[in-house]
Image (spheres, rainbow, N blue to C red):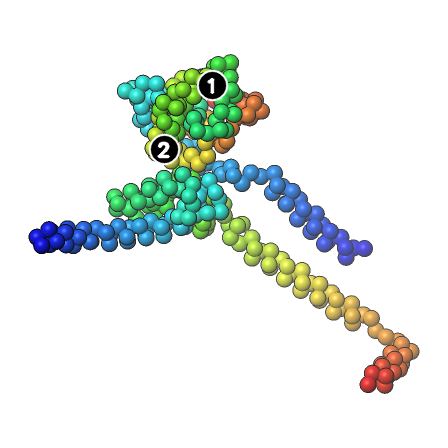
């Protein structure tokens, strides 16, 4: 009986540290999920089984243990592997084109579309029919409506 | 006629971009360490673990830090090139033995030749992480003041030595 109590006591004492570990592990996975594994570039550090990803997950765990903030841990990775390691590209001078390039292309496309439409409209207006042609056209249209039903 | 010119120009520009894209190597990520001081470390030497080595010991020399391991096939491929660079061209090269087993690393050097000034053991790969190593082999060119000037990712080839690494070393030695 005494032994059982002792086991229970140990379990109760250990419980908070387990829970803590779970929270730290979740935080580690949250951070690692936002980082690109450089060995296999389409996987995150959280998902990859590459040796380097395993090491980097361990690094993140250790840094969480010593009380580093998420931003500090991310900065640690960027210092070593560059912005490329981040899935969310930071907005800065060198990445402006990456961020706004698609919008520029869209604006350019809309501009081309608008000018083309305007030109087409004016070219339709230019194609005026002579009286003769209009009569022929009306005759043809009348024919089709007669035959149409 | 002219209505076909602009789509054609657009198409040619697009093909140009795509063709340029094919020449890029997405696996070679530009290192953030270029023109920055080489991270400091103190590691045991491979041949005599009781002695340590720090990059500060190479101050005043243009030298290479070559990350290698006995388990790495591409390292074996580049090894003759690295050894020739050390022996024929007299470039001091320090080996960073990355995540390796000491005995295997030593016998690998005995089998394939050892052109290194010395190698250091980074058993845990910690220094590798500090240098942003993600694919062994990697080679760093470090100048007299301890700044990293160039990083070669993957096996060093004869043409890389001839066209890039050696000219850079000679320039830095001026």
Which disc, if any, is residue B167? none
**Residue B109, image x and y in percent?**
43, 19
Q: Is residue A40 above or below residue B81?
A: below
- Quadrant showing the N terminus of chain A: bottom left
Q: Chain of mark 1?
A: B
Instruction: Identify the residue shown where x is 83% and y is 83%.
Output: A148
Screen quadrant of the C terminus of chain A: bottom right
Badge 2: chain ID:
B
Task: Please indicate whether residue B160 sits to the left or right of residue A30 in the image.
Answer: right
**Label 1 element class:** helix
Query: Residue B118: x, y in percent?
Result: 38, 19
Callout 2: helix, strand or loop? loop
Q: Position of residue B5 (x, y in %)?
A: 76, 52
Closer to the observer: label 1 or label 2? 1
Residue B100 position (above or below residue A54): above
The answer to whether the residue labelled 1 contacts the one labelled 2, judged by CB atoms less than 8 Å apart, is no
- What residue is shown with label 2? B125
Graded by Cα atoms within 10 Å as few (under 14), some (14 to 19) or many (20 or more), the crowding at tag 1 reads few
Identified at 51% across, 24% down, the residue is: B78
Evaluate whether residue A86 shows in this view.
no
Residue tagged 1:
B112
Furthest residue toward left: A2
Whether residue A107 sits left or right of residue B88 in the image: it is: right
Task: Using the numbered discs, state the Cα–Cα distance from disc 1 to disc 2 in whole angstroms.
Answer: 23 Å
Callout 2 environment at 10 Å: few (<14), some (14 to 19), or many (20+)?
A: some
- Horizontal side of A9 relative to A81 (left or right) equals left
Which is more toward the observer, B85 or B33?
B85
Q: Earlier in the sequence, mark 1 or mark 2?
A: 1
Closer to us: B42 or B40: B42
Please state which of residues B148 and B138 is positioned toward the viewer in this rendering. Answer: B138
Q: Residue at x 67, y 60 (%)?
A: A112
Residue A133 pos. (x, y %): 89, 76
């Amino acid at each position: 009986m005494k032994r059982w109590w002792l086991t229970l006591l140990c379990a109760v004492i250990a419980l908070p540290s387990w829970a803590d570990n779970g929270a730290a592990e979740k935080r580690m996975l949250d951070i690692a999920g936002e980082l690109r594994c450089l060995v296999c570039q389409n996987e995150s550090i959280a998902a990859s089984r590459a040796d380097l990803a395993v090491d980097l997950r361990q690094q993140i765990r250790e840094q969480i243990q010593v009380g580093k903030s998420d931003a500090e841990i991310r900065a640690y990775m960027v210092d070593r592997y560059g912005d490329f390691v981040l899935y969310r590209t930071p907005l800065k001078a060198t990445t402006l084109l990456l961020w706004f390039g698609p919008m520029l292309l869209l604006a350019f496309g809309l501009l081309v579309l608008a000018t083309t439409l305007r030109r087409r409209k004016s070219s339709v207006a230019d194609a005026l029919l002579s009286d003769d042609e209009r009569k022929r056209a009306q005759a043809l249209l009348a024919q089709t409506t007669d035959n149409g039903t | 006629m002219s209505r076909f010119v602009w789509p054609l120009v657009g198409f040619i520009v697009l093909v140009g971009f795509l063709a340029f894209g094919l020449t890029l190597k997405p696996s070679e990520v530009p290192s953030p360490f270029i023109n920055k001081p080489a991270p400091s470390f103190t590691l045991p030497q491979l041949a005599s673990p009781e002695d340590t080595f720090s990059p500060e010991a190479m101050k005043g020399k243009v030298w290479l830090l070559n990350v290698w391991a006995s388990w790495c096939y591409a390292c074996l491929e580049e090894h003759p090139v690295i050894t020739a660079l050390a022996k024929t061209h007299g470039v001091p090269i320090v080996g960073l033995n990355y995540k390796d087993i000491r005995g295997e690393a030593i016998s690998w050097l005995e089998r394939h030749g050892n052109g290194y000034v010395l190698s250091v053991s980074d058993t845990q790969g910690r220094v590798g992480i500090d240098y942003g190593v993600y694919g062994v082999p990697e080679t760093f060119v470090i100048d007299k003041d301890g700044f990293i000037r160039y990083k070669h990712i993957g096996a060093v080839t004869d043409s890389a030595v001839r066209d890039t690494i050696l000219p850079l070393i000679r320039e830095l030695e001026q």
